[in-house]
Image (tube, rainbow, N blue to C red):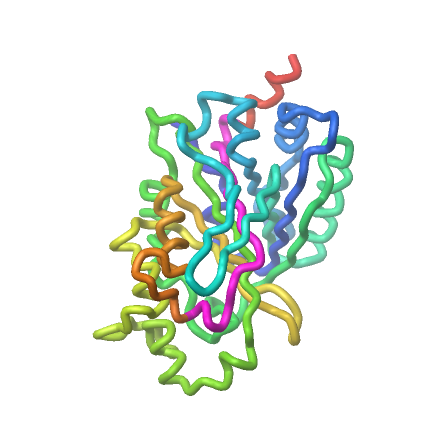
């Protein structure tokens, strides 16, 4: 039985880095897969780092044709709603590093960039950290609908017998916040936007139809496992959306709903934050990554 990369479910880490890479001209997809698979993942200890890696679906399919969901594709076109568009900024690979302190993340990230420099160039880099234990920078609890760690593998990992078994699909987006506009709202107004209470994350009953909770209702679209983190500075900050699912359609449907393509009314939260990036990555199982050295034999 194939297992998901361990860092996906490794909660409690306090420092994160998201590195996206593009394949260099003249290099082939197997070169990148082998180089990334050869990166050594330190064990999760007090000073350790978790490393999760994913690949642009089309690139991964050229490496292992039978090891990716058949319909999976990159974020290759914007999702255009009535008021705004979610941009497509697809790259060839992603490394998500998480650990107990930023110094070890910093050193590991620099080493990874050097190790990959002959096959891929660094396209984007974002560092992030937790805020007030489990809240995002709106002040609300994040991930209230997340399945438990016991339930998550059965819900967001591709099951045995299907292409890509043991792997999962990652949606990665950067959402800067309009902090001044958000903070000008009263708590009651913020709760109406979110569809949840601010102190404890209880869903409003009834919740506004354009609220964030209503627009991304997992009972309606399907379950995902979110590992969102805040990023940025005091004056320029937001949320890194890090969502895992066994089915791309779940993620696509949620984004289309947020953009207003489902009901004609965009998610109320998008008045205060809009994405500036968007990419889908296939995150293969640990066992499949271990097969990458076969590509150079």
> Residue lying farthest front?
82
Residue 98: x percent and y percent?
59, 51
Q: Is 270 on the left or on the right of 112, as rendered?
A: left
Residue 81: x percent and y percent?
43, 58
Q: Which image quadrant: the C terminus?
A: top right
Residue 193: x percent and y percent?
37, 74
Q: Residue at x 61, y 60 (%)?
A: 128
User: Can you tell which quarter of the image residue 257 is in?
Assistant: bottom left
User: Can you tell which quarter of the image residue 35 is in?
Assistant: top right
> Residue lying farthest left?
206
Q: Nearer the viewer, residue 250 or 264?
A: 264
Task: Tell me the magenta residue range.
Answer: 269-288
Residue 141: x percent and y percent?
42, 69
**Does residue 252 lie above or below 158 as drawn?**
below
**Does residue 108 lie above or below 211 as drawn?**
above
Q: Which image quadrant: the N terminus?
A: top left
Q: Which of 104 and 269 is in front in this view?
A: 269
Q: Which residue is drawn at 50% across and 86% down?
A: 184
Q: Residue at x 45, y 67 (%)?
A: 270
Q: Residue at x 46, y 55 (%)?
A: 80
The number of callouts visible is 0
Q: Is 219 on the left or on the right of 150, as rendered?
A: left
Q: Is 258 on the left or on the right of 40, as rendered?
A: left
Is residue 276 magenta-colored?
A: yes
Is residue 118 magenta-colored?
A: no
């Amino acid at each position: 039985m194939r297992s998901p990369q361990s860092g996906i479910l490794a909660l409690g880490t306090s420092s994160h880095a998201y590195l996206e890479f593009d394949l260099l001209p003249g290099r082939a997809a197997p070169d990148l897969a082998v180089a990334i698979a050869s990166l050594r993942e330190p064990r999760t200890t007090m000073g350790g780092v978790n490393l999760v890696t994913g690949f642009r679906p089309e690139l991964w399919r050229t490496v292992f044709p039978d090891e990716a969901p058949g319909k999976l594709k990159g974020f290759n076109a914007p999702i255009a709603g009535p008021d705004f568009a979610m941009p497509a900024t697809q790259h060839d690979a992603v490394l998500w590093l998480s650990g107990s302190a930023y110094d070890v993340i910093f050193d590991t990230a620099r080493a990874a960039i050097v190790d990959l420099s002959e096959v891929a160039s660094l396209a984007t880099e974002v560092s992030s950290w937790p805020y007030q234990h489990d809240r995002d920078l709106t002040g609300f609890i994040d991930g209230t609908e997340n399945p438990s760690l016991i339930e998550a593998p059965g819900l967001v990992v591709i099951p045995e017998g299907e292409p890509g078994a043991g792997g999962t699909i990652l949606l990665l987006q950067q959402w800067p916040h309009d902090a001044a506009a958000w903070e000008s709202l009263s708590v009651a107004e913020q709760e109406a936007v979110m569809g949840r209470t601010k102190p404890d994350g209880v869903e409003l009953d009834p919740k506004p139809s354009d609220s964030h909770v209503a627009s991304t209702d997992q009972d309606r679209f399907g379950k995902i496992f979110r590992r969102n983190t805040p990023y940025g500075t005091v004056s320029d900050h937001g949320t890194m959306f890090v969502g895992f699912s066994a089915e791309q359609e779940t993620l696509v449907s949620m984004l289309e709903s947020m953009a207003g393509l489902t009901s004609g009314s965009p998610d109320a939260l998008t008045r205060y934050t809009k994405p500036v990036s968007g990419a889908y990555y296939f995150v293969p199982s640990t066992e499949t990554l271990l097969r990458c050295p076969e590509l150079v034999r």
